[in-house]
Image: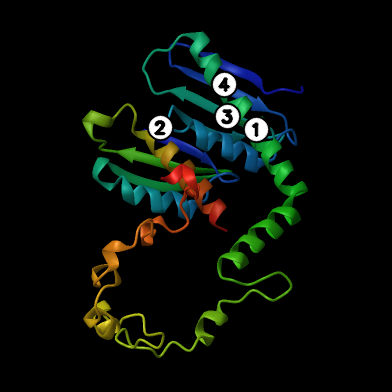
Protein backbone atom coordinates (compact mmCIF):
# COMPACT_ATOMS: atom_id res chain seq x y z
CA UNK A 1 0.00 0.00 0.00
CA UNK A 2 1.48 3.35 -1.02
CA UNK A 3 0.75 7.01 -0.51
CA UNK A 4 2.38 9.66 -2.66
CA UNK A 5 2.59 13.20 -1.38
CA UNK A 6 3.94 16.09 -3.43
CA UNK A 7 7.07 17.64 -1.94
CA UNK A 8 5.90 21.11 -2.99
CA UNK A 9 2.93 20.77 -0.67
CA UNK A 10 3.98 18.37 2.07
CA UNK A 11 7.23 18.33 4.03
CA UNK A 12 9.17 15.17 4.83
CA UNK A 13 9.65 16.15 8.47
CA UNK A 14 5.91 16.79 8.83
CA UNK A 15 5.15 13.40 7.32
CA UNK A 16 7.55 11.66 9.70
CA UNK A 17 6.05 13.48 12.70
CA UNK A 18 2.56 12.43 11.67
CA UNK A 19 3.45 8.81 11.09
CA UNK A 20 4.45 8.53 14.73
CA UNK A 21 0.79 9.12 15.59
CA UNK A 22 -0.20 6.18 13.38
CA UNK A 23 2.45 3.83 14.73
CA UNK A 24 -0.11 1.42 16.16
CA UNK A 25 -1.90 0.97 12.84
CA UNK A 26 0.91 -0.30 10.63
CA UNK A 27 4.56 -0.16 9.65
CA UNK A 28 5.74 2.69 7.47
CA UNK A 29 8.71 3.42 5.29
CA UNK A 30 9.33 6.92 3.97
CA UNK A 31 11.34 7.35 0.78
CA UNK A 32 11.43 9.90 -2.01
CA UNK A 33 10.51 9.40 -5.62
CA UNK A 34 11.33 12.47 -7.69
CA UNK A 35 8.98 15.24 -6.58
CA UNK A 36 7.08 12.92 -4.30
CA UNK A 37 7.39 11.63 -0.76
CA UNK A 38 6.52 7.96 -0.93
CA UNK A 39 5.02 6.29 2.13
CA UNK A 40 4.95 2.53 1.93
CA UNK A 41 2.54 0.98 4.41
CA UNK A 42 3.04 -2.64 5.41
CA UNK A 43 1.21 -4.80 7.91
CA UNK A 44 -1.75 -2.43 8.29
CA UNK A 45 -4.39 -2.89 10.98
CA UNK A 46 -7.13 -4.99 9.37
CA UNK A 47 -9.93 -2.82 10.74
CA UNK A 48 -8.56 0.34 9.13
CA UNK A 49 -6.81 -1.10 6.09
CA UNK A 50 -9.05 0.57 3.51
CA UNK A 51 -9.01 4.05 5.00
CA UNK A 52 -5.53 4.16 6.50
CA UNK A 53 -3.70 5.91 3.59
CA UNK A 54 -6.46 8.52 3.27
CA UNK A 55 -6.62 9.10 7.01
CA UNK A 56 -2.85 9.60 7.05
CA UNK A 57 -3.11 11.99 4.09
CA UNK A 58 -5.75 14.05 5.90
CA UNK A 59 -3.72 14.10 9.08
CA UNK A 60 -0.53 15.14 7.30
CA UNK A 61 -2.40 17.89 5.43
CA UNK A 62 -3.96 19.26 8.63
CA UNK A 63 -0.56 19.15 10.31
CA UNK A 64 1.02 20.99 7.41
CA UNK A 65 -1.66 23.71 7.41
CA UNK A 66 -1.44 24.22 11.16
CA UNK A 67 2.33 24.46 10.94
CA UNK A 68 2.09 27.11 8.24
CA UNK A 69 -0.39 29.13 10.30
CA UNK A 70 1.95 29.08 13.28
CA UNK A 71 4.90 30.59 11.41
CA UNK B 1 -10.47 28.70 -17.09
CA UNK B 2 -11.91 31.01 -14.42
CA UNK B 3 -13.37 28.48 -12.02
CA UNK B 4 -12.07 25.24 -10.55
CA UNK B 5 -12.42 22.57 -13.20
CA UNK B 6 -13.63 19.06 -12.39
CA UNK B 7 -10.69 17.11 -13.70
CA UNK B 8 -11.93 13.62 -12.87
CA UNK B 9 -14.95 12.09 -11.18
CA UNK B 10 -15.29 8.49 -10.11
CA UNK B 11 -18.51 7.63 -8.30
CA UNK B 12 -17.36 4.02 -7.77
CA UNK B 13 -14.36 5.03 -5.71
CA UNK B 14 -16.16 8.14 -4.45
CA UNK B 15 -13.42 10.47 -5.61
CA UNK B 16 -13.51 13.77 -7.44
CA UNK B 17 -10.48 15.72 -8.63
CA UNK B 18 -10.52 19.47 -9.04
CA UNK B 19 -7.96 21.33 -11.07
CA UNK B 20 -7.16 24.88 -10.01
CA UNK B 21 -5.29 26.88 -12.62
CA UNK B 22 -1.89 28.13 -11.55
CA UNK B 23 -2.18 31.57 -10.01
CA UNK B 24 -5.96 31.45 -9.79
CA UNK B 25 -6.00 30.86 -6.06
CA UNK B 26 -3.11 31.54 -3.67
CA UNK B 27 -1.90 28.41 -1.88
CA UNK B 28 -3.06 29.83 1.46
CA UNK B 29 -6.63 29.88 0.15
CA UNK B 30 -6.30 26.30 -1.09
CA UNK B 31 -4.97 25.18 2.28
CA UNK B 32 -7.74 27.05 4.09
CA UNK B 33 -10.45 25.47 1.96
CA UNK B 34 -8.91 22.02 2.37
CA UNK B 35 -8.79 22.47 6.13
CA UNK B 36 -12.51 23.24 6.23
CA UNK B 37 -13.35 20.15 4.18
CA UNK B 38 -11.15 17.74 6.12
CA UNK B 39 -13.87 16.66 8.54
CA UNK B 40 -16.29 15.79 5.73
CA UNK B 41 -13.95 14.18 3.22
CA UNK B 42 -10.44 12.95 2.54
CA UNK B 43 -8.44 15.67 0.82
CA UNK B 44 -5.17 15.15 -0.98
CA UNK B 45 -3.38 18.06 -2.62
CA UNK B 46 -1.05 17.69 -5.58
CA UNK B 47 0.53 19.77 -8.31
CA UNK B 48 0.88 18.84 -11.96
CA UNK B 49 3.90 19.57 -14.13
CA UNK B 50 2.40 22.93 -15.22
CA UNK B 51 2.03 24.10 -11.63
CA UNK B 52 -1.75 23.69 -11.51
CA UNK B 53 -3.09 22.52 -8.17
CA UNK B 54 -4.96 19.21 -8.16
CA UNK B 55 -7.35 18.64 -5.30
CA UNK B 56 -8.41 15.03 -4.83
CA UNK B 57 -11.53 14.91 -2.66
CA UNK B 58 -12.81 11.49 -1.56
CA UNK B 59 -16.00 10.89 0.30
CA UNK B 60 -15.67 9.30 3.73
CA UNK B 61 -18.63 7.09 2.84
CA UNK B 62 -17.90 4.13 0.57
CA UNK B 63 -20.27 4.94 -2.27
CA UNK B 64 -21.46 8.41 -3.03
CA UNK B 65 -23.66 9.70 -5.83
CA UNK B 66 -22.07 11.92 -8.45
CA UNK B 67 -24.28 14.77 -7.29
CA UNK B 68 -22.90 14.55 -3.76
CA UNK B 69 -19.33 14.49 -5.02
CA UNK B 70 -20.00 17.55 -7.14
CA UNK B 71 -21.48 19.18 -4.07
CA UNK B 72 -18.26 18.48 -2.15
CA UNK B 73 -16.27 20.01 -4.99
CA UNK B 74 -18.57 23.03 -4.96
CA UNK B 75 -18.11 23.42 -1.23
CA UNK B 76 -14.36 23.38 -1.73
CA UNK B 77 -14.52 25.99 -4.51
CA UNK B 78 -16.80 28.25 -2.45
CA UNK B 79 -14.55 27.97 0.55
CA UNK B 80 -11.47 28.74 -1.53
CA UNK B 81 -13.17 31.87 -2.83
CA UNK B 82 -14.17 32.84 0.70
CA UNK B 83 -10.56 32.42 1.83
CA UNK B 84 -9.33 34.65 -1.00
CA UNK B 85 -11.81 37.37 -0.08
CA UNK B 86 -10.93 37.11 3.60
CA UNK B 87 -7.23 37.46 2.84
CA UNK B 88 -7.97 40.46 0.60
CA UNK B 89 -10.00 42.19 3.32
CA UNK B 90 -7.34 41.44 5.90
CA UNK B 91 -4.67 42.94 3.67
CA UNK B 92 -6.74 46.04 2.87
CA UNK B 93 -7.65 46.75 6.49
CA UNK B 94 -4.53 45.46 8.20
CA UNK B 95 -3.50 48.81 9.67
CA UNK B 96 -7.01 49.63 10.83
CA UNK B 97 -7.44 46.22 12.48
CA UNK B 98 -4.09 46.51 14.22
CA UNK B 99 -4.95 49.98 15.49
CA UNK B 100 -8.31 48.82 16.85
CA UNK B 101 -6.84 45.77 18.56
CA UNK B 102 -3.91 47.68 20.06
CA UNK B 103 -6.25 50.39 21.36
CA UNK B 104 -8.51 47.77 22.89
CA UNK B 105 -5.60 46.02 24.57
CA UNK B 106 -4.11 49.32 25.76
CA UNK B 107 -7.48 50.43 27.08
CA UNK B 108 -7.91 47.24 29.05
CA UNK B 109 -4.71 47.93 30.99
CA UNK B 110 -5.54 51.59 31.54
CA UNK B 111 -3.26 53.22 29.03
CA UNK B 112 -4.75 56.10 27.08
CA UNK B 113 -3.88 56.96 23.51
CA UNK B 114 -0.53 58.51 22.80
CA UNK B 115 1.49 56.59 25.32
CA UNK B 116 3.51 53.55 24.49
CA UNK B 117 1.88 50.30 25.39
CA UNK B 118 3.89 48.25 27.81
CA UNK B 119 3.07 45.79 30.54
CA UNK B 120 5.82 47.38 32.67
CA UNK B 121 3.22 49.70 34.16
CA UNK B 122 1.92 46.78 36.13
CA UNK B 123 5.32 46.30 37.75
CA UNK B 124 5.62 49.99 38.65
CA UNK B 125 2.69 49.88 41.06
CA UNK B 126 3.65 50.07 44.70
CA UNK B 127 1.97 46.88 45.75
CA UNK B 128 3.75 45.96 48.97
CA UNK B 129 0.51 45.85 50.91
CA UNK B 130 -0.45 42.79 52.89
CA UNK B 131 -4.04 41.61 52.71
CA UNK B 132 -4.44 42.61 56.39
CA UNK B 133 -3.36 46.20 55.71
CA UNK B 134 -6.24 48.64 55.53
CA UNK B 135 -4.99 52.14 54.66
CA UNK B 136 -8.50 53.42 53.84
CA UNK B 137 -10.06 52.10 57.04
CA UNK B 138 -12.76 50.14 55.28
CA UNK B 139 -12.21 46.96 57.23
CA UNK B 140 -13.33 48.43 60.60
CA UNK B 141 -16.32 46.50 62.01
CA UNK B 142 -19.61 48.36 62.18
CA UNK B 143 -19.93 47.92 65.97
CA UNK B 144 -16.52 49.42 66.52
CA UNK B 145 -17.05 52.27 64.11
CA UNK B 146 -20.40 53.32 65.65
CA UNK B 147 -19.57 52.39 69.23
CA UNK B 148 -20.47 55.81 70.66
CA UNK B 149 -23.56 56.28 68.54
CA UNK B 150 -25.01 52.90 69.50
CA UNK B 151 -25.01 53.74 73.23
CA UNK B 152 -26.99 56.95 72.66
CA UNK B 153 -30.74 56.90 72.95
CA UNK B 154 -32.54 56.54 69.67
CA UNK B 155 -34.31 59.79 68.73
CA UNK B 156 -37.64 58.06 68.05
CA UNK B 157 -37.75 56.46 71.56
CA UNK B 158 -37.08 59.70 73.45
CA UNK B 159 -39.75 60.91 75.85
CA UNK B 160 -42.31 62.99 74.08
CA UNK B 161 -41.17 61.87 70.71
CA UNK B 162 -44.53 60.18 70.14
CA UNK B 163 -46.41 63.49 70.45
CA UNK B 164 -44.84 64.85 67.37
CA UNK B 165 -47.19 64.24 64.53
CA UNK B 166 -46.56 64.13 60.85
CA UNK B 167 -42.82 64.00 61.33
CA UNK B 168 -41.39 62.02 58.52
CA UNK B 169 -39.13 59.20 59.56
CA UNK B 170 -35.90 58.38 57.83
CA UNK B 171 -37.61 56.19 55.23
CA UNK B 172 -39.99 59.01 54.37
CA UNK B 173 -37.35 61.57 53.61
CA UNK B 174 -37.57 62.64 50.09
CA UNK B 175 -41.02 61.10 49.70
CA UNK B 176 -44.36 62.80 49.13
CA UNK B 177 -45.46 64.84 52.12
CA UNK B 178 -48.99 66.20 51.79
CA UNK B 179 -49.54 69.55 53.50
CA UNK B 180 -52.59 69.75 55.65
CA UNK B 181 -54.70 72.84 55.03
CA UNK B 182 -54.68 75.17 58.00
CA UNK B 183 -57.65 77.13 59.33
CA UNK B 184 -61.36 76.42 59.91
CA UNK B 185 -61.49 73.44 57.68
CA UNK B 186 -59.31 71.57 60.17
CA UNK B 187 -61.77 71.88 63.12
Residue placed at 51% from the left, 85% from the top? B125
Q: Are marks 1 and 4 on the same chain?
A: yes
Subunit ID for the residue under disc 2: A
User: For the residues marked 1 and 3, what is the alpha-carbon distance in whole angstroms?
Assistant: 17 Å
Residue B122 or residue B67, whichever sits in front: B122
Residue B19 or residue B132, whichever sits in front: B132
Residue named by callout 3: B55
Residue named by callout 1: B82
Residue B32: give its label: none
Secondary element at image label 4: helix
Q: Nearer the viewer, mark 3 or mark 4?
A: 4
Residue named by callout 4: B73
Q: Do residues under tags 3 and 4 come within 8 Å of each other at their CB atoms?
A: no
Residue A54: give its label: 2
Subunit ID for the residue under disc 1: B
In percent of width and height, residue B63 lies at 39, 13
Secondary element at image label 2: helix
Q: Nearer the viewer, mark 2 or mark 1?
A: 1
In percent of width and height, residue A63 lies at 46, 47
Upstream in sequence: badge 1 or badge 4: 4
Q: Are marks 2 and 3 on the same chain?
A: no
Residue A55 or residue B141, whichever sits in front: B141
Mark 3 nearby-residue class (10 Å; few <14, some 14–19, many ≥20): many
Q: Are marks 2 and 1 on the same chain?
A: no
User: For the residues marked 1 and 4, what is the alpha-carbon distance in whole angstroms?
Assistant: 14 Å
Amino acid sequence: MELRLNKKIYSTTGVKECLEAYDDFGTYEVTTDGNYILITITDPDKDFETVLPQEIANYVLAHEIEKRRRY
Amino acid sequence: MATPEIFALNAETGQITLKLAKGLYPMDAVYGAAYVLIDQAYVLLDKDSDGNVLVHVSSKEEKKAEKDLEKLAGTFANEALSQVLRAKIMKAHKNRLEAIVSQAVAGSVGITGGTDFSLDVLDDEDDDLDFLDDPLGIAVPWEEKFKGAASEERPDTREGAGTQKNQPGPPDSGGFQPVKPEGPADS
